[in-house]
Image: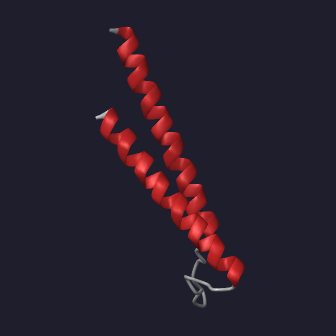
Amino acid sequence: MEKRLCNASYWIGIVSTVLAVIMRGLAIVGVFVFPASPGAIRISYHTFLDGAMLFFVMAIASSVTMWAKSQKS
């Protein structure tokens, strides 16, 4: 179970990082991918960057848990 969680969170973190880099690049050029509607929450590259950090920390924690379990046995 931990191995699947580790793999899934790693790849979701990679996808979030790529989306953040693409959105940041488009923001530098002046193209907005997600235009803000009145009263809507604006989605920026920072949203994906925060998600990427969360998933990478989850992958690291899952790896440490797997390592600790293997050291006990």
Answer above or below: position of 44 versus 68: below
Q: Position of residue 24 (x, y in %)?
A: 65, 71
Q: Is residue 49 left or right of residue 1?
A: right
Q: Is residue 58 above or below residue 71?
A: below
Q: Is residue 15 visible?
A: yes
Q: Could you tell me residue 4's position as x and y percent?
A: 31, 40
Quarter holding the N terminus is top left
Q: Is residue 29 above or below residue 20?
A: below
Q: Is residue 27 above or below residue 73?
A: below
**Quadrant in the rendering for residue 35:** bottom right
Way the structure is coloured: secondary structure
Q: Residue at x 37, y 18 (%)?
A: 69
Name the residue nearer the viewer: 26 or 54.
Answer: 26
Q: Quadrant of the C terminus?
A: top left
Mark yes or no: residue 44 visible.
no
Instruction: Identify the residue at image location x=57%, y=70%.
Output: 22
Tag count in the figure? 0
